[in-house]
Image (cartoon, helix red, strand yellow):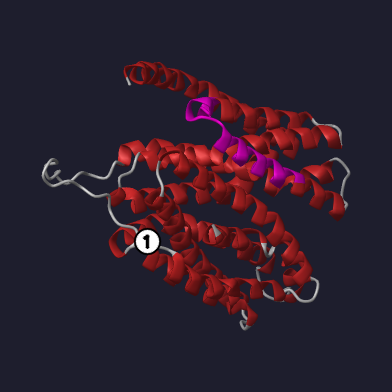
Amino acid sequence: MAGSCLPVLGAVLLAPVLPRMQDHFADVPGSAALVPVVLTIPALALAVLAPFAGVIVDKLGRKRLLIAATALYAVFGTAPLWLDSLHAILISRILVGVAEAAIMTACTTLIGDYYSGELRDRYLALQTMCASASATLFFVLGGALGAANWRAPFWLYAVGLLIAPVMARVLPTPTPPARDDKTEPLAPARAFPMRRMAGICLLTLFGAVVFYTVPVEMAYLLDDLGTDSTGTIGAVTAVASAATVLGSILFTRLAAHRRPLPILFALCALGFLLMSLADSLPLLITGAVLNCIGTGMLLPSLVTRAMARLDFADRGRGMGLWTAAFFLGEFLCPLALLAGKEAVGSLAAAVGILGAATALLAAGLLPAARRRSHTAVPAAEQR
């Protein structure tokens, strides 16, 4: 769980200090565009490299790669403490993304290795809960440390040097499921299930855009309503994070047949539509809470469906593809909403369009969900 929070650290830690960093590198040509990229480039690197990390996970082993990547995460993450070149800092941030790709892929793969069934679902939901809660914590820590100096938040990346030895000591090395050679014939080599993974990865990419809209855009939506108090923005962000955690808890309390994707996407869509129509702070918060409860259930639902499609030998590559899809959606989220804002004239209207698209997706998934529920009932009756 601690390892799964490290990519979140990279995503939110530096947001409070970007203005100070902008002032420091004001004389560097193109700094107006390059400084914000310092925050987002690890997510892009993670999205591009996670599939390759997945292949390495399957070849070299999950635990070994996780420990090495966590240590390198600390080295690359703290590098800006001593770098004076903005371009060198950007390179170090790309390397942070490389380490994050390995960490996130290995962590999710290990959950699939260690657990199965409902217990696996609970741990995958716990992964979402920890990531959501840590995002708020890291945002606060980044702001507090940044008050002293824009470089100070980079010290938090050193936590990787504390976590890596603990991982090496306490995490068991996963082994393939045992096979009874007397009763089971040797199975022929099976191709990687690319077609089955393609659909869930596309859904995950869109789901990531849905997941990150509230954390990324809430401050701008509040500003459009005339609320620019940092205290209010922080409080609303905390409420949204708490709603995501609540959604993850609800995921673990509901049986698998009671959390179909169409309903979860529909709940997210309803939240977006309320946010787009909001002319007051309470209505905006209500929409955000509904949306975040939905995303808190949506993310573990997507990853558990992806995990169910994979055998032990394919799990690293499969989770690499899934991780790439999710973080690519994170990177595309602000770009998609910016394009929508330019097309329709306001961010609220762009959120409304995203809500309509989410509702259409929910409607499109409904027939397939009904077919699965009908086929599941006879099987259950036979048992």
* Residue 83 covered by magenta stretch: no
Name the residue beneath numbered marker 1.
Answer: 62
Residue drawn at the location 60% of the way across and 58% of the way down: 8
Residue closest to the eye, 35 or 138: 138
Query: Does the rendering let one see residue 346?
Result: no
Residue drawn at the location 88% of the way across and 43% of the way down: 226
The stretch in magenta equals: 239-262
Tell me: 212 left or right of 305: right
Q: Main secondary structure of the magenta part?
A: helix
Residue 44: percent from the left, percent from the top?
52, 57
Q: Secondary structure at mark 1?
A: helix
Q: Decide: few, some or many residues near mark 1? Use Cα within 10 Å; few <14, some 14-19, many ≥20.
A: many
Query: Does the rendering let one see residue 230?
Result: yes
Tell me: 275 left or right of 292: right
Residue closest to the eye, 97 or 131: 131
Instruction: Name the amino acid, label 1.
Output: Arg
* Residue 260 covered by magenta stretch: yes
Residue closest to the eye, 314 or 86: 314
Q: Quadrant of residue 67?
A: bottom left
